[in-house]
Each structure stands twice: as structure tokens, then as C-alpha cells.
Image: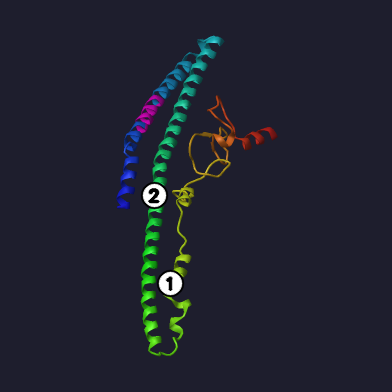
């Protein structure tokens, strides 16, 4: 019965997931199309500039180059938006995976508790029956009990030792565990990708991607952005 409840709740939680994934993938495909259009525009503007550069005045050259620069900036903006969508899609799926892990851990704990309780009940029942038999033997004048009747070797003690050795996994432990141990880590905090992230514009940056909160960002900054380490290295130079 508990399995059916867990399964029903989990299926309800992922009911809208396919629609959300389809929406994100459609948006990413649209961004790809718009990026390709901008790339074509950049090629056309570059060809026009190269062919007419000798006949253009200085102000016209600056204006033409500014158009090319704006097209490049728009292209980069589309690319950044696509990266953000990809991260959002990953987090969307990862959230449901973590919930499934937590539900499985809770369900496993409940099963262990039920098994332990049933084990204690059956063990106590056997102990009572043995006590009755021993009482009858004592009345008949039986001698001694031997080592087999010692408390240390009783099934209840053995059951306690086994249960003490099996430490149950808590749901919080599962939530703290990474879904994939081989997943790459980023940022100054050395954690996996989540939420909004920003890339360092230094091509030689060893970390590359950073969480907004870890670098004190609330929104995406305009222009080039360098991480704290690369900023210090640039100042030293």
C-alpha cells in the first residue's frame, strides 16, 4: 500500500515535466535559429565592409563596424540564453531525481522498521515459550541450564546486535548526495552546476563557470566579466 502511495505522489509530481521539457527544447531550438540568422547577417555585413571599405568615410566605417559589433553581441546574448535554458532544464530533471531518491530512502526505512518490529515480536514470543518450558522443568527437578540458555546468546540479543550494525539511511543523506558521482564540479565552491551561472571571459580560466550567489551577482552583468581569481591575476600583470 505504501509503495502505491509513493508511486502515485511521484507520478503526480512529474505530470507536467514532459510539457516543461518540450517548452525549453523548443525555446533552445528557436535560439539556435535566431543565432544562425545573426551569423548570416554578420557574414553579409563583413563582406559589404570589406568590399566598400576604400570608398567609405571614417564615420561610415565606424558605423558599419558598430553594426557588426552589435550583431556579435546579439549572437552572444542568444548563446548565453541557451546555456541558461540548458542549466534550467538539467535542474528541472535533477530535482525530480533527487525527490525519487529521497522517497526510496524513506520507503526503505519504513520497510526496515517494519521488519525489525516483526522480528522483535516473534523473538519475544519464542522467549516466553522457552521460559514456560524451563519453569516446568524446574518444577520437575531438572538440573542446571547450561550455556545455551545464557542472555548473551539469546535471539533477542543477536537481533539487537544485527540491527545496531545496520544503520538506516536518512532521506536528508540522500538529498545531500550527488546524483552522479562523476559529474563535474564548478565555481569557487567546487559544487555541481545549479541555478543561474556565469562564465568567465578569460579563455584560460581554470574554473570557467560560477554560481551567481558565489560571486555576489544578482543579474547578468553587461559586457565582459572576469571571475575574482582572474581579476586578481589581471591586476598583477
Residue 237 visible, this angle: no
Whether residue 31 is in magenta: the answer is: yes
Instruction: Please determine whether, in this image, residue 138 is positioned above or below residue 55.
Output: below
Q: Which residue is mark 1?
A: 156
Residue 231 percent coordinates (x, y): 64, 33
Which corner quadrant holds the C terminus?
top right
The residue that label 2 is drawn on is 103
Which structural element holds mark 2? helix
Name the image quarter holding residue 226.
top right
The reply to whether callout 1 and callout 2 are in contact (CB within 8 Å) is no
Q: Which callout, 1 or 2, points at the residue further toward the start of the chain?
A: 2
Alpha carbon distance from label 1 to label 2: 30 Å
Residue at 53% x, 44% y is 191
Magenta segment range?
24-35
Asked if 232 appears above or below 134 in the picture, the reply is above
> Of all residues shown, which one is farthest toward the right?
236
Amino acid at each position: 500500500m505504501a509503495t502505491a502511495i509513493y508511486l502515485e505522489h511521484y507520478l503526480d509530481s512529474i505530470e507536467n515535466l514532459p510539457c516543461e521539457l518540450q517548452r525549453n527544447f523548443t525555446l533552445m531550438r528557436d535560439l539556435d535559429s535566431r543565432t544562425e540568422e545573426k551569423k548570416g547577417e554578420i557574414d553579409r555585413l563583413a563582406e559589404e565592409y570589406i568590399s566598400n571599405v576604400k570608398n567609405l568615410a571614417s564615420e561610415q566605417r565606424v558605423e558599419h563596424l558598430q553594426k557588426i559589433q552589435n550583431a556579435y553581441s546579439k549572437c552572444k546574448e542568444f548563446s548565453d540564453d541557451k546555456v541558461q535554458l540548458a542549466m534550467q532544464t538539467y535542474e528541472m530533471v535533477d530535482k525530480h531525481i533527487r525527490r525519487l531518491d529521497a522517497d526510496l530512502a524513506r520507503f526503505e526505512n519504513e520497510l526496515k522498521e517494519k521488519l525489525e518490529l516483526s522480528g522483535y515480536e516473534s523473538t519475544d514470543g519464542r522467549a516466553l515459550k522457552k521460559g514456560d518450558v524451563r519453569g516446568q522443568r524446574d518444577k520437575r527437578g531438572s538440573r542446571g541450564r547450561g550455556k545455551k540458555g545464557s542472555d548473551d546468546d539469546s535471539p533477542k540479543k543477536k537481533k539487537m546486535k544485527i540491527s545496531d550494525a545496520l544503520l538506516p539511511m536518512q532521506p536528508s543523506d540522500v538529498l545531500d548526495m550527488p546524483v552522479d558521482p562523476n559529474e563535474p564540479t564548478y565555481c569557487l565552491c567546487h559544487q555541481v552546476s545549479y541555478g543561474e551561472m556565469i562564465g568567465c571571459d578569460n579563455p584560460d580560466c581554470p574554473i570557467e563557470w560560477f554560481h551567481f550567489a558565489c560571486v555576489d551577482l544578482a543579474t547578468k552583468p553587461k559586457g565582459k566579466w572576469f571571475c575574482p581569481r582572474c581579476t586578481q591575476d589581471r591586476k598583477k600583470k
